[in-house]
Image (cartoon, helix red, strand yellow):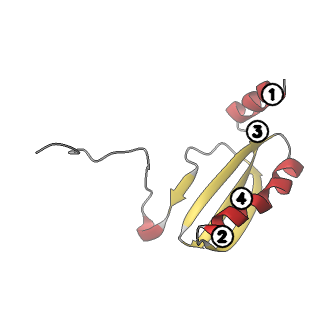
Amino acid sequence: MKEVLLSILNFLGLAWWIEVVTRKPQCTYYFGPFLTAKEADLAKTGYIEDLETEGAMGFIVFIRRCKPNELTVEEDLGERVDRKASPAFSGQF
């Protein structure tokens, strides 16, 4: 039942997410969704530790209701990178 409620809240943009903005690399990461802000707040430490292990630095963390389109947004050079996109001429000669 919890998964159904979470799915509905997320669809409506009412689920809680952890938003982590890093200075290096210049990225925004989203972790979630969560049913409550408290649940998200309790989980944030583990996500920050994972990012630190990967070498990220300079964290700003927000707990907010949102519906992110992408889970990782790279902001270096002012460009947004779609990790799912492939080059238009990939594999062609």
Which comes sooner in the sequence, label 4 or label 2?
Answer: 4
Q: Quadrant of residue 1?
A: top right
The label on residue 5 is 1
Question: Which residue corresponds to the image point at 84% horizontal and 29% vertical from the top-left?
Answer: 2
Q: Nearer the viewer, mark 2 or mark 1?
A: 2
Question: Which residue corresponds to the image point at 67% horizontal and 62% vertical from the top-left?
Answer: 50
Which comes sooner in the sequence, label 1 or label 3?
Answer: 1
Q: Amino acid at mark 1?
A: Leu
Q: Nearer the viewer, mark 3 or mark 2?
A: 2
Tell me residue 67's x, y (percent).
66, 42
Q: Which corner quadrant holds the C terminus?
A: top left
Question: Which residue corresponds to the image point at 71% horizontal and 59% vertical from the top-left?
Answer: 47
Crowdedness of circle 4 by 10 Å Cα count: few (<14), some, many (20+)?
some
- The Cα atoms of the two marked residues, 4 and 2, are separated by 9 Å
Q: Is residue 7 above or below residue 39?
A: above
Q: Residue furthest right?
A: 38
Q: Which residue is mark 2?
A: 52
Q: Is residue 50 left or right of residue 34?
A: left
Q: Secondary structure at mark 2?
A: helix
Q: Which residue is mark 4?
A: 47
Q: Is residue 62 left or right of residue 86?
A: right
Q: Amino acid at mark 4?
A: Tyr
Q: Nearer the viewer, mark 3 or mark 4?
A: 4
Which comes sooner in the sequence, label 2 or label 1?
Answer: 1
